[in-house]
Amino acid sequence: MDAILSYAQARRDAMVELIRRLVEIESPSDNKAAVDRLGEFLADYLSAVADLRVHRAKQVGNHLRVKFRLPGKKKGGQILALGHLDTVWSLGTLERMPFRVADGRLWGPGVFDMKTGIAIVVFAAESLRELGRPVGRRLVMQLNSDEEIGSDSSRAITEAEAKKSAAALVLEPSAGLEGRVKTGRKGVGDYTIRVKGKASHSGLDFEAGASATLELARQMLTIAGFTDLKRGITVNPGVIGGGTRTNVVAEEAWAQVDMRVWRLADGRRIDKKFRALQPFDRRCRLTVEGRLNRPPLERTPAVLRLYRQARKIAGELGVKLGETQVGGGSDGNFTAAMGVPTLDGLGAVGEGAHASQESVLIDRLADRVALVARLIESL
Ligand SMILES: [Zn+2]
């Protein structure tokens, strides 16, 4: 059997124990102190085997850079293992959703997205070190604290690390119970449309008013028309509001819109369309705020090459590694948009991210560790 795979299997209990500790330090994105506690625990845990750097942040948790000390003469460039410390779960969730081991799975808030992913990199690095396997490049694990809330604070750090990297391995959860990796992610844009009309009494002075709600409704039809399912372009006015009373012609109305695209060029094109919106009723004023926040992770030849390399290694480990493309973004979108070969969804095999049945398969921990370790070795 593969030496790293059997090493990882032998370390399974230690891995489960680390995952338990990571899950039991709750780390909601909106609680800096909590996220910082997890970062400090990891920094302490890894201090003997890695060089650590803390990127301090004011509003959100600090971001942690972990450079593992691994055997082998280093050529230029690095491999970026990308993950996040934060979860979508509020403090106290553990009381009703405690970490537990049952039915061949690990359960608990954040176990799948993505605390097990962090443990996979830690044990991949440990196996390479303990087995004395030479690694040709620096291995840097970047753990961001704000991935679940848009990565505003960490984006520049991720991009700076990506610039130095030959490849980015993203430890987000895999897809399906067979553990497919993600070779494509949609880009995401957020827009707010505001209409300022003119208020009037709907009975006494109807014609003097310019209805913001009516104007917004007409704009919604235009915006909905940007959707092009064949190209995977979706535009969703998920939240709208406006007006004050039924007998008042509305002065104000607004909408919040989510836009998703497979291709950067489509994102730019739709962005222009948002900016070019004009009021139907000239008495109304229209303002559009927002942009494409996350560029898409496009399924480029570079991404495919990396996927095929991973698939070959997985095959040698006795695992069939499938691929998929998903509508949700990750920090891998940023590295891929910079042209860095990026493979996402290399993390845990399980299900239920952001849901109460969040869990990971215990008997898929070892092959995931071996896959990541051998991929690092091969780059
Ligand atoms: Zn995640």
Image (cartoon, rainbow, N blue to C red):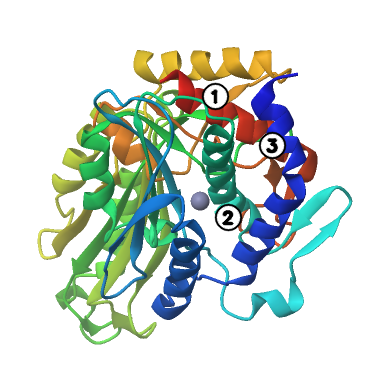
List x then y, in percent, for residue 20.
69, 62
Residue tagged by mark 2? 115
Q: Residues within 10 Å of mark 1 (few under 14, many from 20)?
A: many
Identity of the residue drawn at 75% across and 71% down: 98
Instruction: Give me the residue at 74% from left, 66% from top.
Output: 99
Q: Earlier in the sequence, mark 2 or mark 1?
A: 2
Q: CA distance from mark 2 to mark 1?
A: 21 Å
State whether residue 353 is above or below residue 295.
Answer: below
Q: Nearer the viewer, residue 317 or 109?
A: 317
Place of residue 356 in the rendered image (x, y in percent of width and height, measured from the top left)? 72, 62
Question: Decide: marks 3, 1 in contact (CB < 8 A)?
Answer: no
Q: Which residue is mark 1?
A: 374
User: N-terminal of the two: label 3 or label 1?
Assistant: 3
Residues at marks 2 and 1 touching, judged by CB atoms closer than 8 Å? no
> Which is more toward the observer, 43 or 152?
43
Q: Does mark 2 have its CB less than 8 Å from ligand 1?
A: no
Measuring from the top left, give residue 308's x and y in whole percent.
51, 13
Q: Please identify the quarter of the rendering in which residue 47 is found.
A: bottom left
Say which residue label 3 marks: 8
Tell me the quadrant of the picture where the C terminus can be found: top left
Q: Secondary structure at mark 2?
A: helix
Q: Quadrant of the N terminus?
A: top right
